[in-house]
């Protein structure tokens, strides 16, 4: 190649390389926004569903949080807790909805319903976890708001069996072996 033909050939190569320019930034941002729109809508639907307190039948939904083996309903905020005691409160969950939620989950022969709308389930067992220690659960109406309630859960302290000494364990084994023979 001669020096006279190198210049135009180099210019032609540069022009060919530059013809594949990327789209202007505004266009690529618009394309990204259009592609992300379905994902944003889906995320928004999931967020709304997670904040929903009630199902289609108007029943409270569980929050996913469990205390003393009892599933806590959505909308309840923990305001106090101790070793075997928890207190929740809500400005959005009414007493009727709360007792309708708790009733099917608890098993007890001692339910105290008061005229103020409060209900106490004494020494109740959690239906889904019957071997868990019993709980006393009180659902009460909060004054000042129509859909405000308080949930108080007190779990019976687990009974600890005293440990056997080595001698006691050996004696127990001897008695059981003798009985088995």
Image (spheres, rainbow, N blue to C red):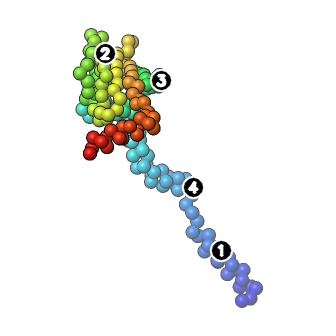
Q: Specify which label sits upstream in the sequence, 3 or 2.
A: 3
Q: Give the foreground label among 2 and 4.
A: 2
Residue identified by numbered label 3: 82
Q: Secondary structure at mark 4?
A: helix
Task: Place residue 105 in its image quadrant.
Answer: top left
Residue identified by numbered label 4: 25
Q: Is residue 2 above or below residue 152?
A: below
Percent across and percent down for residue 117 are: 29, 14
Residue identified by numbered label 1: 14
Q: Is residue 77 above or below residue 4?
A: above
List the single residue furthest toward the bottom.
Answer: 1
Say which residue appears at 26% left-offset and 27% top-offset.
107
Say which residue appears at 28% left-offset and 12% top-offset.
114
Percent across and percent down for residue 48 are: 38, 37
Q: Secondary structure at mark 3?
A: loop
Q: Specify which label sits upstream in the sequence, 2 or 1.
A: 1
Task: Place residue 11 in its image quadrant.
Answer: bottom right
Q: Give the foreground label among 1 and 3.
A: 3
Circles 1 and 3, Cβ within 8 Å, touching? The answer is: no
Report if residue 38 is visible in the image: yes
Q: Quadrant of the N terminus?
A: bottom right
């Amino acid at each position: 190649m001669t020096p006279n033909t190198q210049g135009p050939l180099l210019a032609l190569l540069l022009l060919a390389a530059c013809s594949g320019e990327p789209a202007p930034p505004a266009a690529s941002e618009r394309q990204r926004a259009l592609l992300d729109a379905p994902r944003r809508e889906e995320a928004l639907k999931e967020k709304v569903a997670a904040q929903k307190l009630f199902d289609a039948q108007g029943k409270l939904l569980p929050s996913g949080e469990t205390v003393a083996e009892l599933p806590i309903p959505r909308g309840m905020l923990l305001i106090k807790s101790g070793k075997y005691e928890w207190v929740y409160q809500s400005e959005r969950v009414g007493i009727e909805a709360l007792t309708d939620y708790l009733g099917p989950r608890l098993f007890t022969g001692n339910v105290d319903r008061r005229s103020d709308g409060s209900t106490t389930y004494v020494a109740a067992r959690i239906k889904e976890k019957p071997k868990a220690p019993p709980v006393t659960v009180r659902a009460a109406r909060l004054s000042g708001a129509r859909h405000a309630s308080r949930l108080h859960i007190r779990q019976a302290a687990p009974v600890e069996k005293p440990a056997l000494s080595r001698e006691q364990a050996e004696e127990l084994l001897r008695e059981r072996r003798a009985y088995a023979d």
